[in-house]
Amino acid sequence: MKRLHLAAALLAALVALPAAQAQVWEYKSYKKRGGGAQYDKEVFTMGTISVEEKDGKAFFRMTAGGVDACLRGDIPAIVTKSDETTIVEPQIALSGCEKFRYVIRNDGSGGRRESWRNEAWKDTGWDHGLTPKK
């Protein structure tokens, strides 16, 4: 009888687990001033980026005001975790979209956005926040 109760408790705990795990970070999305071609460090929208793991696959989502077509919806992503960082690399299927990734410090102190240029990852030098959403 004791084993039956234990089995029922374990089954209830498993059913209560969420089907998907999500991590969410605060995100500063920089905008172009006055329709120009250059982004402005003084003009940004606060939003979030998130990674949700479903059925063994990771999906990236950005919610930060209006985003361009490259960043709309759930985007498959490669997520690499170490003790120090979580690296999120969206796998954008649309042609003409920039290849980039986020390197986020696991201690909650932020991170950086890197772009793929000249066959190497380069820090963009812009503060995007990348702190855990509270």
Image: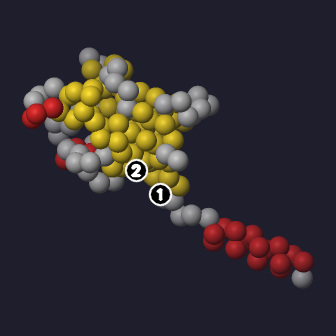
SS state under label 1: strand
The quadrant holding residue 14 is bottom right
Earlier-in-chain disc, 2 versus 1: 1
Q: Residue drawn at (35%, 42%), measured in percent from left and top?
A: 46
Q: How is the image coloured?
A: secondary structure
Side of 21 where 60 appears, left or right:
left
Is 93 drawn above or below residue 3 in the view shown? Answer: above
Q: Amino acid at mark 2?
A: Phe
**Nearest to the observer: residue 51 or residue 47:** 47
Percent position of residue 118, x then y: 26, 17
Q: Which residue is mark 1?
A: 54
Side of 126 where 38 appears, left or right:
left
Is 128 drawn above or below residue 20 in the view shown? Answer: above
Side of 26 where 69 appears, left or right:
left
- Does the rendering let one see residue 28? yes
- Does the rendering let one see residue 78? no
**Nearest to the observer: residue 32 or residue 90:** 32
Image disc number at residue 131: none
Q: Are marks 2 and 1 in contact (CB under 8 Å)?
A: yes
SS state under label 2: strand
Numbered circles on residues, count? 2
Q: Which residue is mark 2?
A: 59
Q: Residues within 10 Å of mark 1 (few under 14, many from 20)?
A: few
Q: Residue drawn at (53%, 55%), measured in percent from left and top?
A: 21
Outermost residue, left side: 35
Q: Residue drawn at (46%, 29%), measured in percent from left and top?
A: 111
**Nearest to the observer: residue 26 or residue 85:** 26
Outermost residue, front side: 42
Percent position of residue 50, x then y: 42, 47
| Mark 2 to mark 1 CA distance (whole Å) | 8 Å
Percent position of residue 34, x then y: 10, 33
Q: Residues within 10 Å of mark 2 (few under 14, many from 20)?
A: many
